[in-house]
Image (tube, rainbow, N blue to C red):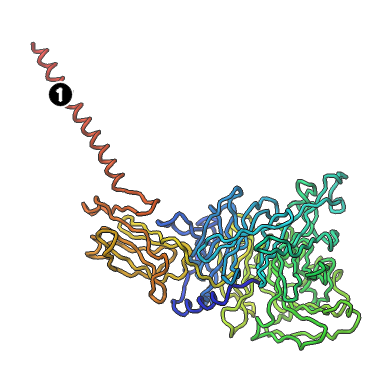
Amino acid sequence: MPTSTGLTWLTWLLFCLATRALQPPLYDASVGGGQAGHYPTLPSFITSKIRAPRVNFATWTPECDDGLYYFITPRGWKVKDPGPMILDAAGTLIWTQHFANNYGGQAYDLKVQAYRDEAVLTFWLGDDTVRGHGQGHYYILNSSYDVVHKVAAANGLFADLHDFVITPEGTGLITSYSKTAADVRPFGRKFSDLWNQAAWDGVVQEIDLQTGTVLFEWRASDHVDMKSTYHKLSHGMSAAGTRAEPFDWYHINSVQKDEHGNFLVSARNVHAISYINGKTGKVMWTLGGKTNDFQDHSEGRALQFAWQHDARFVSVGAFGQSYTPPRSTAGRSTRLMTIFDNAAMDYDHTFGMPYSRVLLLEVGWPDDKAQDDAHVPNHFGTFAHQEVTSQLALSEIDSKKVQTINGTNPAYTVRLLREYVHPLRIRSGTQGSAQLFQAHSQEDATILAGYGINAVMTQYSSNGSVRCDAHFGSVSSWNNGDVQSYRAFKFPWVGRPRHAPAAVWRAGKLHVSWNGATEVKTWVLQASENGVDGWKTIKQEPKKGFETVTELKDLGADAASRFFRFVARDSRDQTCDYGVSVVMERGYLSLFAGLHLHTISDNAGVRYEYILLLVLSIALAFRYRRCFRCRTSRQAAVVSGCERRE
């Protein structure tokens, strides 16, 4: 899994030491039940049109306050103006932005990666209406949220939404889908219109991010038999099997390059993870599915996964407190792997457990396939939290599947060390992620599961206990597409916007926010008589949430000042770069009758005293006109009376 630079981790650590502990509100059952809507949001801000989700923590422990930030991409039928989003550990909004396009601006796969020795944000944006994948670009943003690079696929293909990884060598790994002619009659097509039949090919590209040159390209159709799919045309999604709706038999959804230059690829619709030679493209081995090479040493539970996402090799040292790897054996490799096992394809629950789970697997194989027939001793590591018995027995269908695909070569082994299951047994029919990270080097890694179509992100200890369980959509929104996030991550991050904080004076209150800034600890309120110089500090307000509010009545005699501004200070009491807000002007009319009118010195400001003067002028004009008419009428009446008397 990509990580940020060491400098970012150091900055994050210093920030953690300097800030107080976070504590979100207690779980609100009414919000969880949907009384605030499927996508509950906080009350509107004064300084911004941004709407922040009301994150509901079903579980919160002190370990949740690790100083890291959540990275999600909320979208769905109920999410207005979707976009990449950063939340702090307690669910408070830090940054979001809607990148409008012709397809609703729905972003995917927001995460922190290292690019040119700097921590950056990456996410996908494009056409996600292609059914099950996307055609677009990956965006790279710097710490000031400026777009510094836009990454496209090569050879006439489009960058798919599923995965984009910046390697340590500075290259980019991209997934893509390519439409190819194929005979799909064996998979349910009832017509012999071969001229019109097509399938989606799964493609991996490694590209030079500077030139766009393809360094490596791999196509599933060149190495994998289409008959290995578990998908059928009757499944509905992308299932017509024509050039208009090609058959999605493979469905690539994650790619990782290891230190040997080989690639680990997850393909949802074949229930398999393949290890691919980075030079020849040859499939070196396959875990799971109809072409599985591995013997399951966990009573079938390691090979039971179905419709999975986000397969990754993870460091053996990530569980230094509880995992002891097997002793090194010449000619043999042992790796740990995480998988998000959906166990569902939309509403098809034929295969897998009745819930989604994160799997921690130990995988062993011979380094040279020519040695397959030679005896390579099998040694297993030990894991203190290994589950001895399954929570549920395999279904009859899964038992038959595992018996059919279980490997025959004892040199290839797989064991389930631990499965991480949500207390509510959530089952995600689409999307999902599994991330390993270590908040502290002295403890085991933590597992973060993002539940995809379900607006849930859950953090587990290595022993399977839940540390944090955050919901950003109601339970009633689950599995219906109203609120979802393709993946969920946690990373350290330092955001330094290069625009001024937004500030507004309204109804006797001063409001300030700074979208994307992570280093603000205190807002310093200053006043001036001319709005140019002579600024004096009149109050210091700790940053509270996305928008901090100060009441005018709390300022005493300084409340009579005409101009105000906020200054952002960090944990060292230093003014943040670009941290001086726009100037708030009271306005002349506010000097009378205690009116709290205001103007803002930015372009979005409204001069309310001008509006009031206009309204008063119109009212006086109408009043004058009415009086004039009355006077004229009276004069006419007098004249008329005189005439009658005459």
For the view shown, which residue lies furthest in the front direction?
211
Q: Quadrant of residue 33?
A: bottom right
Q: Quadrant of the C terminus?
A: top left
Q: Is residue 621 above or below residue 248?
A: above
Q: Residue at x 65, y 54 (%)?
A: 136
Please name the amino acid that badge 1 sits on: Arg
Which residue has dot 1 on it?
Answer: 634
Q: Quadrant of residue 366?
A: bottom right
Q: Residue at x 38, y 75 (%)?
A: 573
Q: Quadrant of the N terminus?
A: bottom right
Q: Which structural element holds mark 1? A: helix
Q: Is residue 349 above or below residue 12?
A: above
Q: Residue at x 27, y 43 (%)?
A: 613
Q: Quadrant of residue 327?
A: bottom right
Residue nearer the viewer, 569 or 148: 148
Please indicate whether residue 579 sits to the left or right of residue 490 in the image.
left
Q: Position of residue 483 (x, y in %)?
A: 59, 57
Q: Position of residue 116 (x, y in %)?
A: 60, 69
